[in-house]
Image (tube, grey):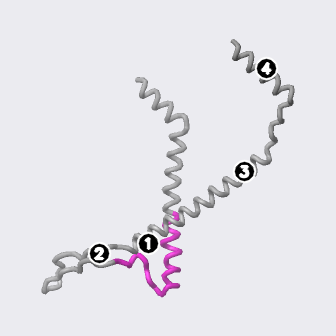
Amino acid sequence: MGLIKEFKEFAIKGNAFDLAVGVIVGAAFGKIISSIVNDILMPVLGVVIGGFSFTDMKITLKHAVLDNSGKIISNPVSVNIGNFIQVTFDFLIIAFVLFLIIRGMNRFMKRREEELPKAPEPSKQEILLEEIRDILKEKK
């Protein structure tokens, strides 16, 4: 029964909820970035480089084998390097956007810490009293 109680406490504390929200938002964000790359950036890049599509890039290891009637006997085997380039491009965009977000958050937190009033330095008398207290604790 202790295991179930511990799990309930863990799930209700918020850590699991925060993680779940992060995963869901991350998945949705990934879909948005994939759409931006596939539907906006890659067509423009394809026009710029002359109508070439990265997803069409492949290295054929074995061509399809056809019989006399044109029916495929064995399918072609290829390395789809264009798909790899596409996924890598998606990753780089996501990583760069996350970098910008984290960079902005760090700057905001640093600025916020600078604005907070700092605790006053203890006086020499307070330091001396703390040292005396510590010495008395050691003697007990």
- The majority secondary structure of the magenta stretch comes to helix
Mark 4 against mark 1, which lies toward the viewer? Answer: 4
Nearest the camera: 139 or 90?
A: 139
The residue carrying mark 4 is: 132
Provide residue 110's location: percent of width, then percent of height.
72, 50
For mark 4, give the secondary structure: helix
Residue type at the position of mark 4: Ile
The tag on residue 85 is: 1
Mark 4 against mark 2, which lies toward the viewer? Answer: 4
For mark 2, give the secondary structure: strand
The tag on residue 110 is: 3
Labels 2 & 3 near each other (Cβ < 8 A): no
Labels 4 & 1 near each other (Cβ < 8 A): no
Residue type at the position of mark 1: Ile
The single residue placed furthest to the top in the displayed view is 140
The tag on residue 78 is: 2
For mark 1, give the secondary structure: helix
Decide whether residue 16 is among the magenta residues. Answer: no
Nearest the camera: 3 or 109?
A: 109
The C terminus, quarter of image: top right
Crowding around mark 2 (Cα neighbors within 10 Å: few <14, some 14 to 19, many 20+) is few
Would you identify the image quadrant in which residue 128 lies?
top right
Mark 2 against mark 3, which lies toward the viewer? Answer: 3
Magenta span = 32-58
